[in-house]
Image (spheres, rainbow, N blue to C red):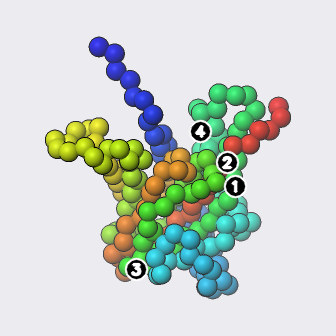
């Protein structure tokens, strides 16, 4: 017998060890940005969520995070690229603050190739990260369920965890049922052709 997976969806998982002090700095940055711009429009969250502008890479605290992020997407570039000279580059990066009873509804990141999320602060019961099966035809399949018919993948991420996934993959974050804010960093990557 020959077995192969066809049209699989890649997801990459990394973890930043000893992230406590950096995450504290990023949390402080998030609250500073909220105080400076409390009324920024929400792009994918509920009315109780807040998202920074997509250029927060200029903030000193985020600059400290960028070497780790860059090392992750460099590994992904090497794994994926079939053509020499093509690398993934950071297109935009922003901070999400989900206060109690807020969430991020199902959405995609149009205009990008790879997207991701890094967990800065995640209290217990503050919501898991969901990914939805992109194969729309699977919804017509009836019982019995098998490993081929999983419609939802749930990631119970912890502080320091980072996920990368195709930007077209629908994802969401569950309701924050804690009494504290959940803070994450989201980002989009695009392929760039840099001459050798």
Q: Identify the mark nearer the N-term, 1 or 3.
A: 1
Task: Name the element at disc 2.
Answer: strand
Residue named by callout 4: 76
Image location of residue 63, percent across then percent down: 70, 61
Q: Do the residues labelled 1 and 4 touch (CB within 8 Å)?
A: no
Residue named by callout 2: 190
Q: How crowded is mark 4: few (under 14 residues within 10 Å), some or many (20 or more)?
A: some
Q: Identify the mark nearer the N-term, 1 or 4.
A: 4
Q: Identify the mark nearer the N-term, 3 or 2.
A: 3
Q: Identify the mark nearer the N-term, 2 or 4.
A: 4
Task: Name the element at disc 4.
Answer: helix
Q: How crowded is mark 1: few (under 14 residues within 10 Å), some or many (20 or more)?
A: some
Residue named by callout 1: 91
Task: Name the element at disc 3.
Answer: loop
Image location of residue 176, percent across then percent down: 38, 73
User: What numbered label is drawn on residue 11?
Assistant: none
Residue named by callout 3: 100
Q: Residues within 10 Å of mark 2 (few under 14, many from 20)?
A: some
């Amino acid at each position: 017998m020959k077995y192969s997976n066809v049209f699989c969806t890649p997801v990459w998982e990394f973890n930043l060890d000893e992230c406590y002090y950096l995450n504290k700095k990023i949390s402080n940055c998030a609250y500073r940005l909220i105080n400076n711009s409390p009324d920024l429009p929400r792009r994918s969250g509920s009315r109780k969520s807040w998202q920074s502008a997509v250029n927060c890479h200029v903030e000193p605290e985020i600059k400290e995070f960028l070497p780790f992020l860059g090392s992750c997407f460099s590994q992904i570039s090497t794994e994926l690229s079939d053509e020499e000279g093509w690398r993934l580059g950071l297109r935009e990066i922003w901070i999400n603050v989900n206060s109690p009873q807020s969430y991020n509804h199902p959405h995609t990141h149009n205009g990008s190739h790879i997207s991701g999320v890094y967990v800065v602060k995640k209290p217990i019961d503050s919501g898991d990260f969901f990914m939805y099966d992109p194969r729309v035809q699977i919804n017509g399949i009836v019982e019995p369920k098998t490993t081929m018919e999983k419609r939802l993948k749930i990631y119970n991420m912890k502080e320091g965890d980072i996920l990368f996934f195709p930007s077209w993959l629908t994802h969401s974050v569950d309701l924050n049922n804690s009494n504290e804010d959940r803070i994450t960093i989201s980002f989009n990557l695009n392929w760039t052709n840099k001459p050798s």
